[in-house]
Image: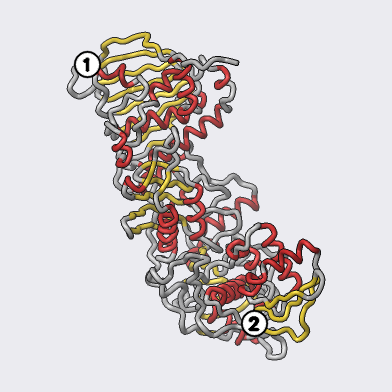
Amino acid sequence: MAKIHLLDNETINKIAAGEVIESPKSIVKELVENSIDAKADEIIVEIKNGGKSLVRISDNGKGINKDEVEDAFRRHCTSKIESSDDLNSLFTLGFRGEALASIAAVAHVEVITRTANDDYGIKMSIEGGEIKLKEDVGCPVGTTITVTELFYNVPARKKFLKSDASESGGVNEVVVSLALSKQNISFKYVNNGSVAFRTPKTTNLLNTISSLYDKDLYNSLLKVEYEENNIKINGYTTNLNYYRGNRKQQVVFVNDRFIKHKRINYFIEAAYNTLLPKNKYPACFLKIEIDPWLVDVNVHPAKTEVRFQNEEFILNEVKRAIYKSLNSKSIMKEVTNDIYLREEHRATKEPSNNFSVFERINKDKTSLYDGTDYSDSSNYDNIKFKEVSFTDNNTVDIFENAIEEESSNHKYADLYHMDIFEENDHKQLDYAEDEISINTPMQHTFLEHEEQIEQKIPELVVVGIVMDTYIICENPEKNQMFMIDQHAAHERINYEKFLGQYNKNQIIRQELLVPEVVNLSYDDFCTASNNMEIFENLGFSVENFGINAILINNVPTIFVDSNIKDVFFTILDSLKDSGKSNLNLLLDKIIKNACVKSVKAGDRLHISEVRALLDNLKQTENPYTCPHGRPVIIKMTKYEIEKMFERIQS
């Protein structure tokens, strides 16, 4: 058996380096954070071959005193804290005193630095933790640190480095996040000799975002301003016109420190519940300011993970801030000429005009943010209906490219006369007349705390219906056209109706004329028997009916015309999959069943049904999307339509 012994300093430093320095992006993060702590307002980041060959960070900060340069590269030497008490009130990004020592232990490092009090600077070279050169040198005030030959003495770590492109992507992510955290600092990022991007020195986060991201994201931003309960949350989040397939564009800072916190991401997305399609995520840039005593940043050597005191409270405040922003302006999906052109590009297979962050640096930029204010939208309490007739049955194709996410199997559609609404040829709808609210613990929408938007969509004049699916409306001024998906609209109404009844514990039930007997396996029977209370809360009256069978006597009225067994098994399977008797986990399944009774695409509606549909849509919390995140209503302006017909030359 081996004896217990003390490791030598070289081994200790390499082990410590393994915790702090995982890849080139770790080096960039640690060195740039040091530059920020040194009060630099201009930082240049250079890398080659993904940072494996070269990482160089230059800044115009305070610099390092000559007699402190060697100490800076010793483990646990720092100028940022004096004692453990300081860990509870950190205002710097670095504090552990490990980064420089860890980098020097596994790479060749050269540092050139000078303070404002010195006439000349100092240059020092370190290889594997040993000082090889130290001499005076002429240089500007600030610090430049160059790192080469990463992991030259740790081949086991070096072989696990990823490709140049992958490592470069990691560095890009770090530099972008740091640039967003400090918009008052100008960043210049050079990758393999080419300037990838520059950010301006500014007081406005929007200017930094515009230099880093594409126009579509920029134009979709909604401002987040929230301050309650000693928590301040500022930044931007995207409206319904922009979403991505991953969370990489969700950037969160706590006291100007970039963090990765999965639960914060989940609560951000919870504020968008039912607003976006499944597996689509918003982009957001949030800066959370809280008392340093309430957050522990000394959790991980990389300092990207934090712990909060009273975490649930803080996460709900984040959700509340996003929700307030989403409800501060109209978030109706709007068809623009850009969308039309994108569809045209797809059809003709012409290359699009989307530039990467590296290509856009050389493009002339114009102002991207139009700051559109929707506060002048008119309330549509008085929906008007107008009889429209046509002299022939000519088809029209003006909406073919205007619908971004919905497509049809038919290239053309008849624009029906309003006299298609015959009393003997319609499907009666079951609507509740009372106003629907989803002020629910399940959704945490906080409506009781927020001032709601009074005018979500303007006054509508119904013009007609195309494809037996889309209700065409215009505003009284005749300069905006709206297309409403009748199925998506009814789906939204049914969803909020059921959810509102559930959260008020007032689900309207209907007794079945013939009770439904459901035979089950032993496993399913046990699950159902153990969760009778959940079925009762959802409006289903369920009781045991002999061996491995249950009897359903009452169901929510919204499911009366549905296949009762299918609905029952959907809930039962959800309970088994979740492993918990948690109603929140059933929400997605319930949403999908809520549309079973909805008006379908292709159903012809009577004028009274259209009136009821729009009137009930008006009462919903979110008239913009169905529960699955698809658009309910799409707006096209007269200007955009005339551009499509080339009546206006842009």
Residue matched to label 1? 120
As drawn, which residue projects farthest toward the bottom?
423
Q: Nearer the viewer, residue 305 or 374?
A: 305
Query: Which quarter of the picture shows residue 83?
Result: top left
Q: What residue type is labelled 2?
A: Arg
Q: Where is residue 334 in the image (x, y as percent from the top left)?
A: 51, 63
Q: Where is residue 546 in the image (x, y as percent from the top left)?
A: 81, 74
Mark earlier in primary sequence (2, 1): 1
On residue 509, which mark appears? 2
Q: Is residue 576 above or below residue 153?
A: below
Q: Where is residue 555 in the image (x, y as percent from the top left)?
A: 68, 79
Q: Nearer the viewer, residue 233 or 89?
A: 89
Query: Which quarter of the picture shows residue 496?
Result: bottom right
Q: What residue type is labelled 1?
A: Tyr
| SS for dot 1 | loop
Q: Is residue 405 above or below residue 485?
A: above
Q: Which of 522 and 424 is in front in this view?
A: 522
Identify the residue shown where x is 47% and y is 30%: 25
Drawn side of residue 197 relative to residue 279, left or right: left
Q: In this view, does 186 lie above or below 121?
A: below
| SS for dot 2 | strand
Identify the residue shown where x is 33% and y is 42%: 183
Q: Where is residue 56 in the image (x, y as percent from the top left)?
A: 40, 24
Identify the residue shown where x is 46% and y is 30%: 26
Marks 2 and 1, how far apart at CA: 84 Å
